[in-house]
Structures are given as C-alpha cells and as structure tokens.
Image: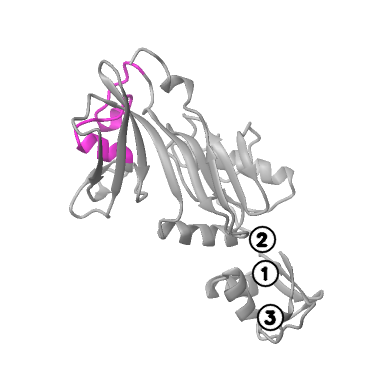
Amino acid sequence: MKWTITQQHEGVMIRSYLQQKHKFSKRMIKHIIHGGGAIKVNGTNRTVKYELNAGDVVAVTFPEERKGAMMIPEKMPLDILYEDDAVLVINKPPGRAVIPSYVHTSGTIANGVLAHYEEQGLSYTFHPVTRLDRDTSGVMLIAKHRWSHSLLSDAQKNGMISRAYYAIIEGHLQQKTGTIDAPIGRKEGSIIERTVTTRGKHAVTHYTVLNEFSHHTLVHVRLETGRTHQIRVHCSHAGYPLAGDDLYGGVTDHIDRQALHCHKLSFEHPITGEQMCFSVKMPDDMKQNEW
C-alpha cells in the first residue's frame, strides 16, 4: 500500500496518519511493526513517530499471513463478480463448504480462493466477511487482506453490510410481511444446530411474501443481524421450515438442499468509500415450477 502525503498532513506522525486517514487500528499497526511487516517513507524504514512532509511517499507492507494446516490451494472454477486489491465478491454455488473442516477437508471455497491468490502471486490467507452455509448459494464477500478484513468486520458489526435472500418455505404465512425477533444460540448437545433460546444472541429477520404455491411460499428476506443459521432457525421456529432443510424440520421432496439464496449484497468499499452493490439471479433448482 502506498500513499503520497499532501499539505494537509504535513507534520503529522505516521501513526496518526494511518489511524485517522486510513482507519488502521492500534492492533493493526503493532502487527505490522512486530509481525514482520514494514512502514517506509521514501524507501526508508521509519518509526510510527516520524513526522511526515508533503510529497513523502508512505509505503506499508503487511506481514506474510499464516495459513491453517487445511488451507491448501486447490484450483477450481470461481464465479467472480468483482475483484480489486482489497475485496473479492463471488457467486457461491450450493453444496460447497466455505472453509475446510474435519467433515470437509478439501474442495471448499477457501481452497479455491487460495489457489486464485497463488496464481496472482499473493500470500494472503482466506478472510470471509459474509459466510454462507454449505448448501446456501449466492453473493459472498471476501476481504483479501487483514486490513480490509478489519474494516469490513467493523462495518458488519455496525450493520453497514446489507444482505437480502430468496427463501422457499413450507406452508403459507398468514402475515405477508413481518419481522421475526428472537435470540439464537447453540442447541444444547449439538455443535452444529442452533435454536431460539433466551440465552442466545439478539437476532432479527425481516421478510416479505413474493409468491405462493400449492404447498410452499417464496419469501424475500433481509437480515438485520447475522447469526449462524439465522434464517433457517427463525423460519423453523415460526413453523415454516425452509424446503429441503432437513436439519430444521424441512423435507427434501422437491429440493435436496435448503432453498436459500443470497441474491443481493451491498457495502461501502473499505478503502475507497464507494457504495458497492451486487446481485445474482435465483439458481435453477429454486426456480422449478413444481412447488
């Protein structure tokens, strides 16, 4: 990363410049200094107390990122919607886990993204911002390096990243538009399932009915919070599980995965501040006419 100092920041210390102008946290700066990175001015290493002059070129090099044992690059097709130096936006297919685990040791989105980075000569690890379940499809946001991940994580915590979904639920809702506000936590005795519980974290889901079929309903869903399995748990709790979601009470007669698709994602670019918006069409297995 390189920036040329203007008159506005004449006499400002590097530390203040990075924090105020580029939103570097104290933790991030310490990581650069002590983790093997570098902060240079006009090609010379400088401390964070160095006072800048107009015309100086500040260059920040991040430490090489460590990768987990399962983070092995695997070349695979990626449906890339957008990419620059800071972010990667993809259209995730159903049936592919996001990160490796003991259940899915390879073939994940992370493995594919690392191979994509390797082709570009980048040493980054995998920084997902908006994760999707293995069988959920749609738009997914990935930060390319630790700095953009830090900024996007803060934006997500502050509700500045917007996601909208298409979901097909079983049955017909009496109220055609509404909000489900119910805390979600881990289900006792399970490391996978979540449930509505008073011990859980605040979770809010907004929905609108788009179309009704014989035994199912197409619903537009907007998340106010982003808890694990939130839409699946809230719909099941309300008595309308997602079609195909056998983990939370749905049946697989019409579709062999939960009928859930993230069709729209919007966020403020962490570096440029530009408002970004991406949308993708509903996949074929959710557009079938036999609902």
Where on the picture, by quarter, is residue 34? Answer: bottom right
Q: Is residue 50 above or below residue 265?
A: below
| Residue 233 counted in the magenta span | yes
Please indicate whether residue 94 sits to the left or right of residue 12 in the image. Answer: left
**Disc 1 vs disc 2: Cβ atoms closer than 8 Å?**
yes
Quickly name the residue at label 3.
Answer: 9
Residue at horizontal 35 percent and vertical 12 percent from the top: 290
Q: CA distance from mark 3 to mark 2?
A: 29 Å
Q: CA distance from mark 1 to mark 2?
A: 7 Å
- Residue 205 appears anywhere in the view: yes
User: In the rendered structure, which disc, 1 or 2, sits on the residue that comes first in sequence?
Assistant: 1
Residues 286 and 257: in front is: 286
The picture places residue 5, in percent across and down from the top left corner, at 74, 75
Please give left or right for residue 72 compared with residue 54 in the image: left
Say which quadrant the N terminus sits in.
Answer: bottom right
Which residues, given as a range, are shown in magenta? 231-254
**Residue 189 visible to an observer of this rendering:** no
Q: Which residue is mark 1?
A: 36
State which mark lies toward you, 1 or 3. Answer: 3
Q: Are marks 1 and 3 in contact (CB under 8 Å)?
A: no
User: Do callouts 3 and 2 mark residues in contact (Cβ within 8 Å)?
Assistant: no
Residue pictured at 57% horizontal, 55% vertical: 269
